[in-house]
Image (tube, rainbow, N blue to C red):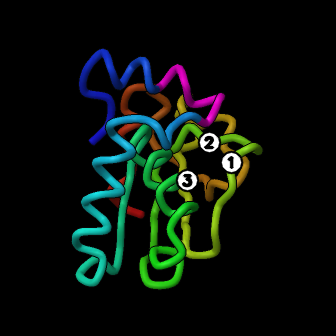
């Protein structure tokens, strides 16, 4: 999913304040998951979508019990909670996820743009 328009950029600016539950993107992810939860065994998110997915997971007991969640290059910090069903990965050179204290770090491109989009192998 990632940032697609100006509303996503505004949502990016809200990340430090954790107001994601009130966003349109959060509601879209939550509704999609709830409509399909018996079919979804794994959920993946990258960048903004990973932060949103993690927030949905934190608010959904069914998801925590029945779905493996994997985050890539997520803009999370120590203030963010990760449940036990979450795996968190980040490229060493990714500036978006540089403050993520939980990520399993992996080596990739040192080009910041390429580093942010390196996650296919994990």
Q: Position of residue 119 (x, y in %)?
A: 39, 52
Look at discs 1 and 3 and give the one toward the viewer.
1
Asked if the magenta segment contains residue 13, the reply would be yes
Residue 77: x, y in percent?
A: 70, 41
Which of the two discs, 2 and 3, sits closer to the camera? 2
Q: Is residue 88 left or right of residue 43?
A: right
Q: Name the residue nearer the viewer: 44 or 107.
A: 44
Measured Cα–Cα span from mark 1 to mark 2: 6 Å
Q: Residues within 10 Å of mark 3 (few under 14, many from 20)?
A: some
Depicted 51 relative to depicted 110: above or below? below
| Residue 28 highlighted magenta (yes or no) | no
Q: 10 Å neighbourhood of mark 2: few (<14), some, or many (≥20)? A: many
Q: Which residues are magenta?
A: 12-18
**Residue on which the image places disc 2:** 76
Judging by the rendered image, the residue that carries numbered circle 1 is 80
Q: Residue at x 54, y 75 (%)?
A: 61
Q: Of callouts 2 and 3, which one flags the residue occurring earlier in the amino acid sequence?
A: 2
Name above or below for residue 29 compared with residue 112: below
Q: CA distance from mark 2 to mark 3?
A: 17 Å
Q: Which mark is residue 106?
A: 3
**SS assignment at label 3:** strand
């Amino acid at each position: 999913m990632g940032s697609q328009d100006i509303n996503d950029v505004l949502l990016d600016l809200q990340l430090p304040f954790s107001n994601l539950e009130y966003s349109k993107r959060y509601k879209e992810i939550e509704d999609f998951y709830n409509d399909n939860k018996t079919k979804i065994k794994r959920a993946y998110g990258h960048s903004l979508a990973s932060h949103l997915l993690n927030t949905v997971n934190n608010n959904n007991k069914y998801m925590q019990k029945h779905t493996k969640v994997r985050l890539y290059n997520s803009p999370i910090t120590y203030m963010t909670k990760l449940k036990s069903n979450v795996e968190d990965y980040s490229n060493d050179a990714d500036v978006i996820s540089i403050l993520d204290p939980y990520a399993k770090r992996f080596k990739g491109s040192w080009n910041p743009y390429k580093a942010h989009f390196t996650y296919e192998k994990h």
